[in-house]
Amino acid sequence: MRILVTGAAGFIGYHVSQRLLERGDEVLGFDNVNDYYDPTLKEARLERLEQHAGFGLMRASLEDREVVERAFRVFKPERVVNLAAQAGVRYSIENPRAYIDSNIVGFINILEGCRHHSIEHLVYASSSSVYGANTRLPFAVDHDVDHPVSLYAATKKSNELMAHTYSHLYGLPTTGLRFFTVYGPWGRPDMALFLFTRNILAGKPINVFNHGHHRRDFTYIDDIVEGVVRVLDRVPAADPDYDFGHATPAASAAPYRLYNIGSDRPIELMKYIGLIEDCLGRKAECNLLPLQPGDVPEAHADVEALRRDVGYAPTTSVETGVRRFIDWYRAYYRV
């Protein structure tokens, strides 16, 4: 297939693109390679993707409507994986407009491209952050998500609503994936595993928020990619018999689906730090701090729907995943 992957220079986008190329798909990557974090890491990812004859790249922002339209018109994708977004909960408090530009304006441009070019299936990134102030665990896709605690989360909830509208009005098949704390080789430098590893190796203290009482559903990148690709290959169908009297946010009469994608095995942050220490052979100096604005203290993904519909079964233990990341980090940065 011809597949448009936005955010192809990003962590998840790079790995998804690699998998699609390896199985023989043609991929057009779309990325503005911004400096939210070190662009040299993004360029290194792209360099590896460009080794595949089936990969092309457009360097542009999603909010550039004309360039997005050109990507659809020229490449003629059959399916789209939208992973480009302004990421980060804490950054959204400092720079809210960046999230409106990329996550709202950019997403409507993707939806319009899909609508006008008869795309078979749009798979897009949502986030576990949409659960916000919800305290029911594990988080399930039929739970209330009307109380976001960051603008980032609000933009992702908005994406889900926008996608449903296009599925309803135009019959566009869409599937949203609520990602839970993804980690692994080639990961994002602004996330905990990367930050902790870098500081521990440098002999610097690490900032541990909520005094270390976080619990997170850390999900290894290979398991995430497997889920994304399985979902991409399963196009949702309309359900004319859908009962809106017993509606769930996860489904509709329209060709629309929502899934959690996580490990379903949450662990305490301090245990996670302990695994990093064991792999590095060094102890961390922890700077214990209060809960950050926009953060939630606990996350646990109920992935039963994804398991039922596409056979999703995460297999990578957190011990194995942390070891693989640190092996990559040491080799990449030669430390």
Image: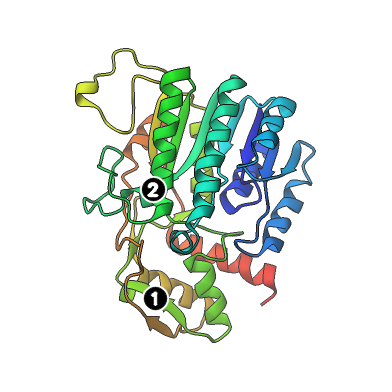
Work out whether 253 lies above or below 204. above
Q: Are marks 1 and 2 in contact (CB under 8 Å)?
A: no
Q: Position of residue 57 (x, y in %)?
A: 74, 42
In this rendering, position of residue 29 left or right of residue 84: right
Say which of 334 and 166 sits in front.
166
Q: Is residue 320 in sight in this rendering?
A: yes
Say which of 38 and 213 sits in front.
38
Q: Position of residue 53 (x, y in %)?
A: 80, 38
Q: Give the amino acid type for the residue marked by disc 1 in the picture.
A: Val
In this rendering, position of residue 102 left or right of residue 43: left
Total count of labels? 2
- Please give the name of the residue rendered at 72% of the width and 58% of the height, measured from the top-left corner: 44
Number of residues whose C-alpha sits closer than 10 Å to that of mark 1, classed few (under 14), some (14–19) or many (20 or more): many
Say which of 305 and 10 sits in front.
10
Q: Secondary structure at mark 2?
A: helix
Quadrant where the C terminus lies? bottom right
Number of residues whose C-alpha sits closer than 10 Å to that of mark 2, classed few (under 14), some (14–19) or many (20 or more): many
Q: Give the amino acid type for the residue marked by disc 2 in the picture.
A: Ala
Q: Position of residue 274 (x, y in %)?
A: 41, 75
- Please give the name of the residue rendered at 68% of the width and 72% of the height, measured from the top-left corner: 333
Q: Residue furthest top?
A: 240
Marks 1 and 2, how far apart in space?
25 Å
Q: Which residue is mark 2?
A: 154
Q: Which residue is mark 1?
A: 208
